[in-house]
Image: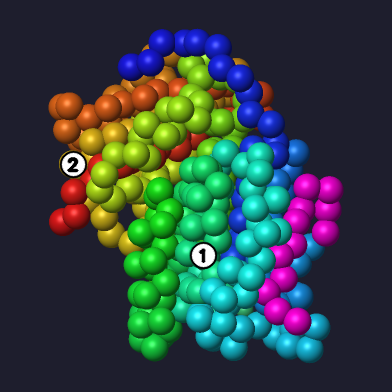
Amino acid sequence: MEMPRTVAVMDPSNILLAGVGGIGCAWARQAHTKCEGSAHLVLIDADDGSFKTGDDIHVLRLGHALDSVGCAALPPLAEQRMRGLSTLTNQLLQTTELVILLTGLGGGVGTGAAHEFARQARQSGAVVLAVAGLPFESQPTRMEIAQEGLERLEKTAHVTVRLSLDRLARQAREKGQLWQMGAEWIEDLVDGLVRTLMRMGLLNLDLMDLRAVVNQTGEATLLVGVGRPDDPKGILEAALKAPLAAIDVGGAKGCLIQVEGGLGMTIGQVNAVANLFTSALDNDAQVILGARVSEDLHDTIRVVTLLSGIRPS
Ligand SMILES: Nc1nc2c(ncn2[C@@H]2O[C@H](COP(=O)(O)OP(=O)(O)OP(=O)(O)O)[C@@H](O)[C@H]2O)c(=O)[nH]1
Ligand SMILES: [Mg+2]
């Protein structure tokens, strides 16, 4: 376990939340409303309907004035246009240390441009965490298209989390929300990651910790759980209910865990949650723990965990 220490707090322009394609942009716009002022947002699409303006919002338009309706499910076209914007993205990425990339695969823009943007970001030195929505089971053709984009994204990004739209939609339905907007899991994840890196905590995590964990070879994934401070089991159960595609996290070699709670949170509660979340890991797994108090969390603890070095099953 890491000891408390002082780190430089990141500047908002060090964290870039990126939405790629229609769904990716919708998720990113929504998540950004929770962390405005702590992260910049870039919206990348060929469809003007995805864009939004604001102080720390950037727009990368993949296309020309005459074809404002997308890349017509053509990933190679989107990829080529993304590559054509590399001068602009390089400028945008100059101060970026971390990219949180959100996209839905199976269409043109997300499938073709997400991995290319990830490549540009990584080349400029940023850590790239990608969340990729996979098409519904009822969309086999889209699934086939998605597969290629996914493979390339997984090769490029440090971490690629596969999100199942079927599971996402089922959970949204249970809550009476639209699946396109009901991505609370994504909001908690983005907000949790941004807070982890942006603000001082009891035990501070910083980018070096993040790099150490993402540099483990093997697969990686993220867990997010929210619950009552006296119920660590419930928090873990909530985390395991995430709409992620199935992955066995038992053998993870690296783990970065951030525990966040309200003013009354105790070190005992932090340890109980951290111990439970890491109990399934290898004995020699590297565990880095961070914790912070947030006044806006009342009687609630939120845990964001990045697990890496997972052996493919
Ligand atoms: N059933 C259903 N699935 C959708 C819908 N919109 C998006 N999806 C799913 O989300 C994935 C990504 O969609 P978008 O983000 O709209 O695609 P895009 O990247 O903008 O790509 P293009 O618009 O084709 O250039 C698709 O492959 C579908 O699986 C919808 O209205 N209905
Ligand atoms: Mg689109």
- The quadrant in which residue 48 appears is bottom right
In the rendered image, residue 71 lying in the magenta stretch gets the answer no
What residue sits 80% from the left and 83% below the top?
Answer: 65
Pick the front one: 116 or 171 = 116
Name the residue carrying label 1. 116
Q: Which residue is mark 2?
A: 251
Distance Cα–Cα, label 1 vs label 2: 30 Å
Asked if the stretch drawn in magenta spans residue 62, the answer is yes
Q: Tell me which residue sits at (44%, 33%) in the image.
A: 210
Question: How crowded is the residue under tag 1: few (<14 C-alpha within 10 Å), some, or many (20+)?
Answer: many
- For label 1, the SS is helix
Above-or-below relation of 74 to 196: below
Magenta stretch? 53-64
Q: Is residue 171 visible?
A: no
- N-terminal-most mark, 1 or 2: 1
Residue drawn 61% across the image and 56% down it: 18
In front of the other: 136 or 77? 77
